[in-house]
Amino acid sequence: MYYTKVFEKIYNEISQIPNNGIVCDYIPELGNVNPNKFGVHLITVDRQEHSFGDSEERFSIQSIAKVLSLTLAYNLENENLWRRVGVEPSGTPFNSLVQLESDNGIPRNPLINAGAIVICDVLLSHIKNPKEELLHFIHKVADNPTIVYSPKIAESEKLAGFRNRALVNLMKSYGNIHNDIDKVMDFYFHLCSIEMNCRELARTFLYLATDLIDPETNQKFVTTSKAKRLNAIMQLCGFYDEAGEFSFRVGLPGKSGVGGGIVALHPGKYSIAVWSPRLNKKGNSFLGIEFLERFTTEIETSIF
Ligand code: GLN
């Protein structure tokens, strides 16, 4: 009850702010969404759930899924993974090419596009059918077998993916892509096409806020040490060249996507997902950040 009241109060405040944000326009299929949608869902580690607005409507989670593919790759490669991709904030837009050449094809971190493409390549080297296996992993983590890729969005990304192809080609020239480029990109475009609603998204990321057990292996989905590192990467790199600003304003590790979703976590306490499709100039949800800033301020808790 308390959280739902807080959500409502904050929503009423932020809906007064002029929102000049625009819905993602470089992936044509993402442009079909109603820009005024707004949803939020919070799940605590002891499984209390609170929601507001369009929290049951699915949207394209886009780059948020990069944390899930990273988790799978990290579990397979352990610390060897960091030979292929760094853990430094990039300070550049998510699809930037500029650092890749001076860094010899090693992306700054796994949450910018270049880094996520390398992670797809790593998974292709380990797994015969990575699209299926990733979805299976997500079904287990999310405790939800209904989550799927959107073939329409994946196709739209493929048609518009000129910069992503430039990134993969540049990395291939440095030897940091081991598999066939078309296979890597097909997997990457599918990864970005996953759809969830706010409730499903908040629940999916609960494994980084508390220990959850994989029913197949009877072990944690990630060790405590890996959860620490994944949260650190989200804190420093989850919002590209706005990661500092997000930390400063919200004070939680999180990840955004150009579909207008943001997930943020308070380790040991809760996971929260917000969706509002209008993006600011950095490609992050304008109202999503406004909302989360006021939320952590209002309830007086953040990790800092
Ligand atoms: N699919 C998008 C892209 O590759 C993901 C970007 C994002 O969500 N920031 O450009």
Image (tube, helix red, strand yellow):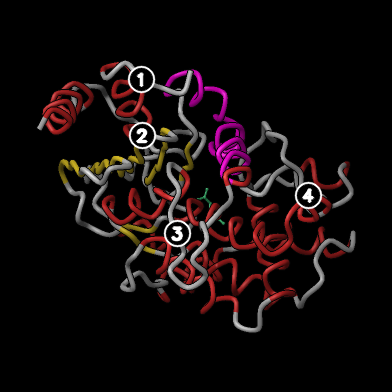
Give the residue pinned by disc 2: 269
- Residue at image point 42% right, 76% down: 151
* Left or right: 196, with 138 as reference point: left
Find residue 245 and name its label. none
Give the residue pinned by disc 4: 82
Find residue 213 and name its label. 3
Q: Residues within 10 Å of mark 4 (few under 14, many from 20)?
A: some
Q: Earlier in the sequence, mark 2 or mark 3?
A: 3
Q: Secondary structure at mark 2?
A: loop
Q: Earlier in the sequence, mark 3 or mark 1?
A: 3
Give the x, y percent position of residue 63: 51, 52
Q: Main secondary structure of the magenta part?
A: helix
CA distance separating discs 2 and 4 = 29 Å
Mark 4 residue type: Trp
Start-end of magenta stretch = 227-250
Give the residue pinned by disc 1: 301
**Viewer-side label of 2, 3:** 3
- Residue at image point 27% right, 19% down: 299
Mark 1 residue type: Thr
- Residue at image point 61% right, 56% down: 70
**Residue 232 falls within the magenta-colored stretch:** yes
* Left or right: 55, with 216 as reference point: left
**Contact, CB < 8 Å: mark 1 with mark 2?**
yes
* Left or right: 118, with 153 as reference point: right
